Amino acid sequence: MAVLVSLQRFRLSDQIVDLLAGEIISGRLQADESLPSEPQLVERFRASKVVIRESIQKLAGLGLIRVSWGKRTVVLDEREWNILAAPVQRAYVEAGRAVELLTHLYEARLIVEPAAAEHAAARATADERDDLLTIVKEMRAISTGSHDTQRFLKVDRDFHDAVARMGRNAALRAVLRDLHATMSQRWLNSKITPAELEVLVGQHQKVAEAIRLGDRNGARAAMAEHIAWAADLETSRAAREASHDPLS
């Protein structure tokens, strides 16, 4: 019973976090504005003080608010927000800021992933280079066969994870892991066409071939081309969705 009560409490806490994060990221609560007091939040959400305090701690951990005990709790400027955290990203989308979110994420990928591919070209073992080509073959088999988008995107994630590992840089790999984790659900929900799958296979083939040859500049350029193409595809799609375009 104690475990059940704890789970229920945390679920309610997460719901409160989502609601308040939405109010902050939509601009209904502005930077430097005070968050409602604990008694006000208890009354509004019909929750215990424990749940409200847990919610406040989570919001602070997301960089959305600053808690100073004995002083007012204030909303932080968006430069402090943890854009890689799922509640923050959900709030961006709900607030109609999906294009802005994707632009930030893809700009980060354009900085980091070409460097990871360059390191992979320089540091991968022969077996790792062969394994990367095997992953591309699996992607091609899916694109020409079942067109199973979810399976394809899982293999795509394997490809990018492999490139990050091959670079032998733990910090770079950790950054990429967080970026990929935050974007994977968006891709899973995407309406990727067979033609787009074919383009993706070709792009990954170019990256894998450059890494196999140890071509650092080629690997960097091929990865940059791939990320830029994906960024254009996803931000355009998000813009259509935001405008309720029937073609989206």
Image (tube, rainbow, N blue to C red):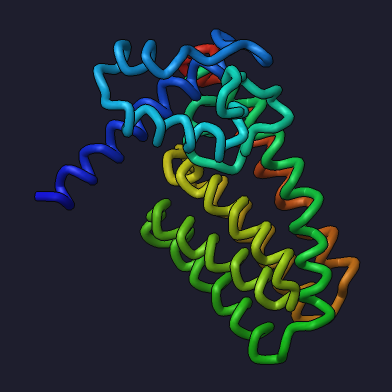
The quarter holding residue 18 reads top left
> Which residue is found at the position 68% from the left and 69% from the top?
164
Residue situated furthest left in the rendering:
1
Residue situated furthest bottom in the rendering:
126
Residue situated furthest right in the rendering:
217
> Which residue is found at the position 53% from the left and 15% from the top?
35
Image position of 190 (left or right of 52): right
Q: Position of residue 145 (x, y in %)?
A: 40, 62
Q: Position of residue 34 (x, y in %)?
A: 58, 12
Q: Is residue 84 above or below residue 121?
A: above
Query: Is residue 122 something that shows in the picture?
Result: yes
Q: Is residue 164 above or below residue 222?
A: below
Q: Position of residue 36 (x, y in %)?
A: 47, 12
> Which residue is found at the position 67% from the left and 40% from the top?
105
Count of marks placed on residues: 0
Q: Is residue 93 above or below residue 243?
A: below
Nearer-the-camera pick, 113 or 199? 113
Q: Position of residue 7 (x, y in %)?
A: 23, 45
Nearer-the-camera pick, 83 or 10? 10
The quarter holding residue 116 reads bottom right
Image position of 86 (left or right of 98): left
Residue situated furthest top in the rendering:
28
